[in-house]
Amino acid sequence: MTSIKVKFRPSATDGKEGSIYYQVIHNRAVRQIGTELRLYESEWDKRTASVRIYAEISDSRKKYLQAVAERIRWDCKCLQAVIARLERKGGNYTVDDVAGEFNSHPGGLSLFHFMQGIISQLKQLGRVRTSETYASALASFMSFRNGQDLLLCELGEDTALLYEAWLKGRGNCPNTVSFYMRILRAVYNRAVEKGLAEQKHPFKHVYTGIDKTVKRAVPLEAIRRIKGLDLTLKPHLDYARDMFLFSFYTRGMSFIDMAYLRKSDLKDGILTYRRRKTGQRLSVKWEPCMEEIVAKYKDAYNTEYLLPVITDPLADGRKQYRNAIYRVNTALKKVARLAGLAVPLTMYCARHGWASIAKSKNIPLSVISEGMGHDSEETTRIYLASLDTSVIDEANSLILNSL
C-alpha cells in the first residue's frame, strides 16, 4: 500500500513564504518530493492539508492560490497514476521508483503534454504536414476541454463520446469527427505502448471510419463561366481564379504542389514535379493557358518559384502557403457567387472537376483513375504510375481544347 501526503514546510525566516512538498510512503519507507510552490503559513490549512483562500485577499493573490491548489491536485493525480503504472508492472517497486517516475515526466502523464511531444517529434522528423494535423486535433480537443488538461489514463469512453457529441454539435461532418478521433486514438495507443496508460479502448463506441464524400466537381460550363469573369477591378479574386484555373489546367494539381513549383521544373515544354503527398513524380505538357497565368505574375515577384504563392524568400515557406490557401479558398467563394455557382468553390474542386469532366469526355478510366476518386490513394497512384505520360497529356489537351 502506497500513500501520498501533501505537506507544508514553513520558512525559517519570519514573513517569508514556505514550500509545499509531497510525502510518499511505501513499505514503511518515506520519500519527500519537493516543489516550487510557495505559500505563507496563514495560507495553508494543516488540518485539511489544503490551500486556504481568504475572502479579504487581492484578486491576483486569490488567482495565484487557486493555481497552487490546482497544481497540487494535478500532481497528486500524477503520483497516483505513476503508482498505478508501477503496480501493473508487478508491484515490486520502491518510493525512489515513484519519485523517479514522477520527476522524469516534466508534464506529468498529461495528454496535452504527451501530444505536444509527438508534434515536436514529427517536426524534427520532417513530417511537417502530419505534425500540423496533430496540432489541429490537439487544438480542437483543448477547445472541447476549455483548456483543462487530463491524464492519459483518464481518457475513457465517456470523454470520447462527449467529444464526439461536441464535434457534431459544432456542425462537423462525420469524416471530420473521425479525423480527430483517429488522431486522438493514435496518440492514446502510443501512450499505451510506452506503458503510460492501460489499454481500455476508449474509442470503441465513437465513429472512426471514413465516409465517401460528395465529390465537389464543377461541370465544364461552370469552368467556362469562372474563366470568363471580368475580375480586373478585383485583383484578389482575379488571383484566386488564376490559381484555380492553373490547378484545373494541370490535371487538378494540389495547391501545395503549385506553391512549391520552381521555375527549373519547367523544361522543354514539360512541367515535372513530385507530389508532396505521395512522392509520386508527374509530368505535365506545358500549354499556352498555363503560360498565360505564369506570365501574368512573372514580373511581380523575383523568386525561384513559378507561381506567386511563396513570395518572401526570407519568411517561412510553409506558413506562406497556409496563409495563401486560406485567402484563395475564401476568395473562391466570392468567385463562385459571381459566376452563379451553387457549390462552395475551393481549390480542391479543380481536381475533382478535371476528373469528372475527363470521364464525361469518355477518356478511359485507366487514364483518369476513376476521376482520381478511388477509395484509396494507393489505387490512384498505381493506375497513374503505369501510364505513358503522352496518354495523360493527350487527355489533358482534349479537356483544355473544350474551353
Image: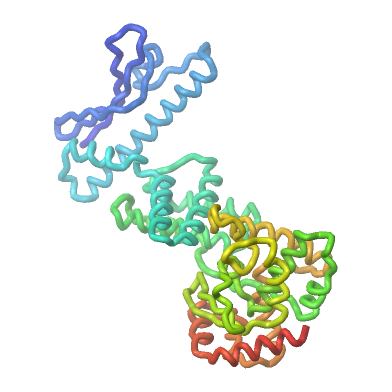
324 vs 272, nearest the viewer: 272
Quadrant of image for the N terminus: top left
Q: Position of residue 324 (x, y in %)?
A: 64, 59
Residue at point 31%, 50% (across, down): 196
| Residue 150: quadrant of the picture | top left
Q: Relative to 75, say whether 54 is above or below.
A: above
Quadrant of image for the C terminus: bottom right
Q: Relative to 53, say whether 372 is above or below.
A: below
Q: Position of residue 48 (x, y in %)?
A: 36, 20
Residue at point 37%, 41% (across, down): 107
For residue 215, say whether it is visible. Answer: no
Q: Is residue 107 left or right of residue 57?
A: left
Q: Position of residue 343 (x, y in %)?
A: 75, 68
| Residue 23: quadrant of the picture | top left
Residue at point 38%, 60% (across, down): 125
| Residue 216: quadrant of the picture | bottom right
203 vs 75, nearest the viewer: 75
Q: Is residue 336 left or right of residue 274?
A: right
